[in-house]
Amino acid sequence: MEDNNDKELEKKTVDAIPDDVEEVASAEDIAKFMSERRKAREEKKHTVERENPEVEEYHSEESALDPYLEPDPEIPWVKYEEPVYLSRGCNHCPRSYQPVSQCERQSCSKVTSTNWLAGIRQPTMRPFDCVEVRFKNNHKDFYRLPDGLEVTEGDVVAVEGQPGHDVGIVCLTGELCRLQMRKHRINPESENVRKLFRRAKDADIERWDASMREEHEALIRTRRIVADMGLDMKVNDVEIQGDHSKAIFYYTADARVDFRELIKVLAEEFHVRIEMKQIGVRQEAGKVGGIGTCGRELCCATWLTNFKSVTTGAAKTQQIMPNPQKLAGQCGKLKCCLNFEYEVYADALKKFPPAGHAIRFQKGLALYKKTDVFRGIMWYAYEGENDLIAVKAEDVKAIIEMNRNQQYPEKLEDYQVELMSTSALASESNSEEVEREIERLSEGGNGVVGQEERGERRAENGERRTGNRQQGGNRRNDRPQRQGDRGERRDRDNRAREERHNTNKIVQQKQQNKPEGKPRDGKGPKPFNGDNNNPRRSGGNNRERRQ
């Protein structure tokens, strides 16, 4: 039975093979075909590589230099170093007993001060014995000079620390330092003013340099520790004292943070005394620095020292759209520069009528849209329309006063101010007039245009302006008119408003023509039916008494 089944299966297989195929390839034949095809591809690839030698792989020797890892000895190699000295007020490591140049200090320091009293000594007063010393970023403090020591701006000095000593750069001396201490409400005669020891020596500067280079790594490690401990705070900056005995960590936090455990961990990690100082987001922006939307360095990082409160009212006064994304600075608060021009705008707006006040005309009600403060122009548009019309602020004041007296001008267009655009300016001074003026001057003219030429020019300008107005009127007439219920409703409202206005006008005229003692349309005082003998309550008796 099995033999018969095999024969039947073989017969069916042979019958399934098409007549044009002589035989079926076996597995060995297929493997042989694939190997030959693979060899042919490799031979073709090698042939192409021999014909195009630039596509060959680069095999460098063991002694060859890697251009990305090792420098070429023939080319000078400049190694990048992190600018750690910029935050201290200098471009490079200063030397002992050599003051930092003024150009270097002013180009690198933050919140710098210009000593405009330098070299001016008061004749009746002894030299001021306190100086201002600058440390990292905007950290400054005042110190008292010892007897017999004179320092200048830019000197690197060693000052008293808590504990130990610190190294900084003198940034302010003399009488201006006295004024600065008075501004910060510090008494120069107080014993709390710390001492300045001496000018920094080479050993002090070397220790100071080593401390500065450890600050960046300490900042990164501290942020990792804070993240591992799960504290809701942000460490912004680290300042290590010049003698490497204390480190100040500046941080920001939305709520109160318990960092007692953090101080213990940081003390074990860095082996220094830890001091934590909380600052605001504005102070953070001043320490970190950055570039503002104006393209310049942040004001709080260069010269701004007092952070005044900024409100949205300052933006509204300056006609700025209340967009939080544009009004907010890098600190997330409102920009400090919103206060710079606020007083100028507030003073200019005193000459304007109250913003948002609508004015009424016989043609309709005009609604307030916007104001150009320095040009003294206000834009209005009729209710239900979008065409803006510019009107002077003085005219708006006069119209408001007329409305209070129940007087309504005919239309808003009578008070429109024509603003000259760029295209109008170009048409006013075209090339033909310039060429004509050049020719006149070349002929020896004295700069005074004749009456005839001036009259022709005025006529041409008048024709040009008339043509422009006609074109503008044609453009307005060519606009598609409003159709449907909205247009009909507006026309119906305008007619009703005009009829109501005419009716009120007629009523007012009638009331003015009536005698004084007669009641006005039943709205006047009613006649008194009581005791006529009372002179205070009877108008007739009063008249009789006066007679």
Image (cartoon, rainbow, N blue to C red):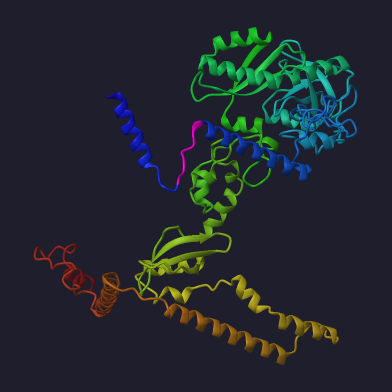
Residue 108, located in which quarter of the rendered image?
top right
- Quadrant where the C terminus lies? bottom left
Main SS of residues in magenta: loop
Residue 347: x and y, percent?
56, 53
Evaluate whether residue 52 shows in this view: no
Which image quadrant: the N terminus?
A: top left
Q: Nearer the viewer, residue 75 or 414?
A: 75
User: Measured along the vertical axis of the image, is residue 37 above or below residue 126?
Assistant: below
Picture quadrant of residue 480: bottom left
Residue 418: percent from the left, percent from the top?
A: 54, 74
Magenta stretch, residue numbers: 21-27
Residue 59 vertical placement versus 348 (above, below): above
In this rendered view, identify the residue nearer to me: 441 or 408: 441
Q: For residue 70: magenta? A: no
Whether residue 281 is visible to the viewer of this picture, yes or no, is yes
Residue 256 x, y percent position in the rendering: 49, 19
